[in-house]
Amino acid sequence: MRLLVTGAAGFIGSHFVRHRVRAGDNVIALDALTYAGTETNLADVRDRITFVHADIADAEQVLRDHRVDVIVNFAAESHNSLAILDPGRFFRTNVLGTQALLEAARQVGVERFHHISRCEVYGDLALDAEQAFTEDSPYRPRTPYNASKAGSDHAVRAYYETFGLPITITNCANNYGSHQFPEKVLPLFTTNALDELGLPASLKQEVPDRPGHDRRYLLDSTKIRRELGWEPLVEFDAGVRETVRWYANNRTWWEPLRDRSPVTEGAWHAG
Ligand SMILES: NC(=O)c1ccc[n+]([C@@H]2O[C@H](COP(=O)([O-])OP(=O)(O)OC[C@H]3O[C@@H](n4cnc5c(N)ncnc54)[C@H](O)[C@@H]3O)[C@@H](O)[C@H]2O)c1
């Protein structure tokens, strides 16, 4: 299969590229290389893919140069904290960028446009709620990031309903694992702990919670289990242990990236 994977130099996109290359697909990996993307994430498959440094908003020529069967759209601004400080860039990439990519897909024709969304478009749940989100839960985003992801979902659906573009959307929960940018909670805590271990507790800093912070998410995975036979291959405890070990063994990956992060937690209060 010929795939265009966008956001391919980011955390999940680069894992997906590695997975599909191993499965024998022909992958065009596209990424704008924002602060969150790095080509080193693709180093081990670099000679087996075509890498294109481009914005999803400018993908039409890329699609004309490299005919593909399927587009998998991971490209996004993805950090809730940054979205509080600079919401405009989230709507530009996540809504307008996705719409431009959809339009390019419509112009050249593809077998499928798969869009990666997230469960935060459904809002949050009470800590003691019995309820879990399903594919039919109403959209109720609470932050600029989540509203921009919800907007992108609506654009994707509209291209199916109005133009018949074949689309699928997945709304997954939080991911964790190797190569996640060190601004996100698990790598942030892990890398800080790796630097702090054995130091005085006074180094710990409490930051005010982010405005609009969602308290809890829970996804009902019945549909994907029933229709695709999906099940987790790695239990959470083992996965977290493996992830922490990866960060401990790969300082050369995360130390330079940490300095590129454009936001310090709690900065919204200072402003
Ligand atoms: N990480 C999670 O827990 C999680 C959970 C659910 C859904 N998602 C979604 O999965 C996707 C990937 O998330 P991630 O955690 O890998 O994010 P990430 O920030 O690690 O990667 C995003 C990538 O997109 C690229 N990018 C940003 N703007 C672009 C643009 N305009 N054009 C082309 N490339 C651009 C960045 O350079 C980066 O490489 C996102 O759509 C995100 O909303 C993430």
Image: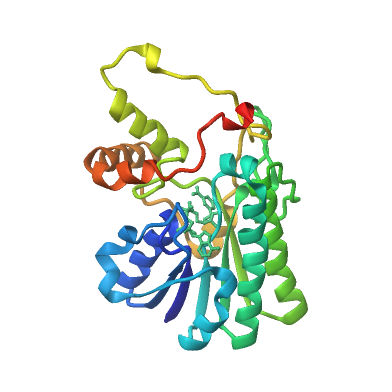
Instruction: Pick the residue in front: 14 or 264.
Output: 264
Give the position of the C terminus as an image quadrant: top right
Residue drawn at (48%, 70%) of the image: 54
Nearer to the camera, 176 or 238: 176
Asked if residue 135 can be seen in this view, the reply is no
- Quarter of the image for residue 270 reads top right
Of residues 142 and 51, the one nearer the viewer is 51
Location of residue 28 in the rendering, given as x and y in whole percent from the top left corner: 41, 76
Which of the 4 image quarters holds residue 25? bottom left
**Residue farthest to the left, as pictured:** 249
Residue 35, compared with residue 194, is above or below; it is below
Residue drawn at point x = 52 percent, y = 87 percent: 64
Q: Residue 152's quadrant in the figure?
A: bottom right
Image quadrant containing the N terminus: bottom left
Is 25 located above or below residue 216 in the figure? below
The image position of residue 141, as x and y in percent, is 71, 46
223 is higher (above) or lower (below) than 251: below
Give x and y (percent) for residue 84: 64, 40
The residue most toward the front is: 271
Q: Residue at x 76, y 75 (%)?
A: 161
Horizontal side of residue 138 vs 132, given as left or right: right
**Foreground pick, 269 / 223:** 269
The answer to whether any part of residue 254 appears in the image is yes
Residue 106: percent from the left, percent from the top?
Answer: 65, 82
